[in-house]
Image (spheres, helix red, strand yellow):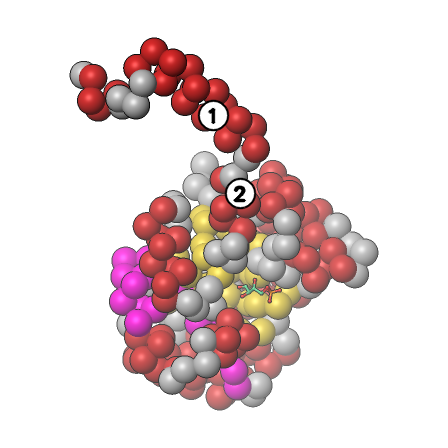
Amino acid sequence: MTLLKLFLDSADPEKIRRALDFYPLDGVTTNPTILSRQNTELLPLLKELRKITEGKLLFVQVTADKSDDMVREAHLIADRLGGDLCIKIPATEEGLRAIKILSRDGISTTATAVYSVSQAILAAAAGADYVAPYMSHIDNLCLDSAQVAGDMAKLFREHYPKTNVLAASFRVAEQINRAVLCGVGAVTVAPEMLPVMIGNRGTEAELESFEKNWSSVYGDKSVGDLI
Ligand code: E4P
């Protein structure tokens, strides 16, 4: 049995700090869009993210479009940041070549922006540690993202045990539940999704009822005040 890995999809230092404090997270994923949203100097931002995620996995994506340049960028990111890193490489022909080279160099990679099982097969065969299907984008093509990601997970278990499905780009909590139930090994969620996952009107109603019944007997005293 392997534990599901839960990552935060963000480059916002404040949101990451808070999420790491409250939630059981294994690390942080970023992409060029998420980083550019911070609209600040890149290296200091990445170093800050590295510091905040110390001891956890940090995902950083290359932006080059030729494989040799992707490999160079990946090494540069690894040299500058160090620690537990995974380099995200787009699931293209050039990306596949970069994943093969980086895998030989001992650098961990994620094939990203993945839409199909065939892309996943090639990325895993090339040596990717993670393959990241973009769930809501796949659903928008009128496909069943959980089914697609579940098929990837099944074929990795059978043929590429080193590779994990890192399901990404969720818009609703039910997409996450379905992906996990279909067998993906990891999910990454935006900070805004976490309160949606934990929040429940039923739980709130129970708490209101506990509070009402308790205070009718013990007033404003807490358990800590009384024992
Ligand atoms: C995954 O690692 C990606 O960063 C992310 O989930 C992309 O999704 P979005 O741009 O559709 O939110």
Tell me if residue 29 comes above or below residue 63 in the rendering.
Answer: above
Which amino acid lies under the numbered mark 2 shown in the image of this protein? Met
The region drawn magenta spans 48-64
User: In 3D space, how far apart are the residues under numbered discs 1 and 2 (Cα atoms)?
Assistant: 20 Å
Residue at far top of view = 217
Residue 135: assigned label: none
Query: Left or right: 40 with respect to 170?
Result: left
Where does residue 35 sit, x and y in percent of width and height? Answer: 47, 75
Front residue of this view, candidates 139 and 37: 37
Magenta stretch: includes residue 49: yes
Q: Which residue is mark 2?
A: 197
For the C terminus, give its image quadrant.
top left
Q: Which residue is mark 1?
A: 208
Mark 2 residue element: helix
Q: Indicate which quadrant contains ligand 1.
A: bottom right
* Crowding at mark 1 (Cα within 10 Å: few <14, some 14-19, many 20+): few
Residue at the image point whose x is 71% and y is 47% from the top: 147
Give the label, 1 or 2, closer to the camera.
Answer: 1
- Going from N to C along the chain, the mark reached first, 1 or 2, is 2
For the N terminus, give its image quadrant.
top left
Tell me if residue 40 comes above or below residue 52 in the rendering.
Answer: below
Quadrant housing residue 220: top left
Where does residue 85 sit, x and y in percent of width and height? Answer: 37, 67
Which amino acid lies under the numbered mark 1 shown in the image of this protein? Glu
Tell me if residue 188 comes above or below residue 158 in the rendering.
Answer: below
Mark 1 residue element: helix
Residue at the image point whose x is 49% and y is 40% from the top: 198
Residue at the image point whose x is 45% and y is 26% from the top: 207
Where does residue 112 sit, x and y in percent of width and height? Answer: 57, 67
Residue at the image point whose x is 35% and y is 76% from the top: 45
Where does residue 142 sit, x and y in percent of width and height? Answer: 81, 56
